[in-house]
Image (cartoon, rainbow, N blue to C red):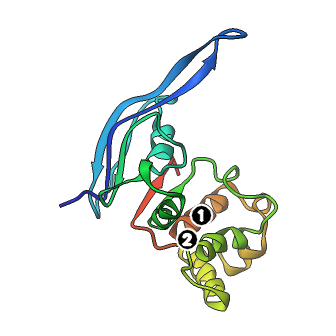
Amino acid sequence: MTSLLRVESLKKYYPIRTGMFSHKMLHAIDGVSFEIERGETVGLVGESGSGKSTVAKCATMLEAPTAGAIEFHGSNLTTLSFNEMTRARSALQMVFQDPYDSLNPRRTVGQTVLEPIKIHKVASGQVAKDRVAELFERVGLRPEHMARYPHQLSGGQQQRVGIARALATNPELIVLDEP
């Protein structure tokens, strides 16, 4: 049976300038491997700065890895076309560590949760808006919160908006970065 998510020998290096014309590579993650089965909950533990967030971003292909394989349902995410990756993203969502930075300050939080529903064609029109209201209630927010902007919410409410956004596409896997 194929794992839901399999990460093999994942590496992510960032160039660091050491002088005007020289740089070295910062090894943020170097050879991380793990598998996640359907229905399984997995925690990644490490010290601050150990690369946990980088693993999450690479595993969801929000950042391209330097090397390694990331398979979701047996498909290597690193080789998918843009359209194939868009389809995969509807089944693979992420809740970010800092909810405020992950929310667009120019959009209401209702618009933010509605966006993936429209992009991934989960629903449209009034059905999509009803889905947003249902998601808000599911995460402990009232429907009237939908008209607010991120700065008008507490940090906990912002985090719940991030969770609602991740749930919007009915994903098979949600990666949470220190929620």
Q: In this rendering, would 169 be left or right of 37? A: right
> Which residue lies under the disc numbered 1?
160
Please report the residue visible at 53 percent of the width from the left and 52 percent of the height from the top: 179
User: Residue 102 at what x, y percent from top left?
Assistant: 66, 53
The quadrant in which residue 113 appears is bottom right
Please report the residue visible at 51 percent of the width from the left and 56 percent of the height from the top: 94
Residue lying farthest to the left in this orientation: 1
Q: Please name whichever residue, 99 or 63, is drawn nearer the observer in this view of the structure.
A: 63
The N terminus lies in quadrant: bottom left
Q: Distance between the residues labelled 1 and 2?
A: 6 Å
Q: Tell me which amino acid carries mark 1.
A: Arg
**23 up-or-down from 40: above or below:** above
The quadrant in which residue 135 appears is bottom right
> Which residue lies under the disc numbered 2?
139
Q: What element carries label 2?
A: loop
Q: How many marks?
A: 2
User: Residue 141 at what x, y percent from top left?
Assistant: 63, 73
- Circles 1 and 2 in contact, beta carbons < 8 Å: yes
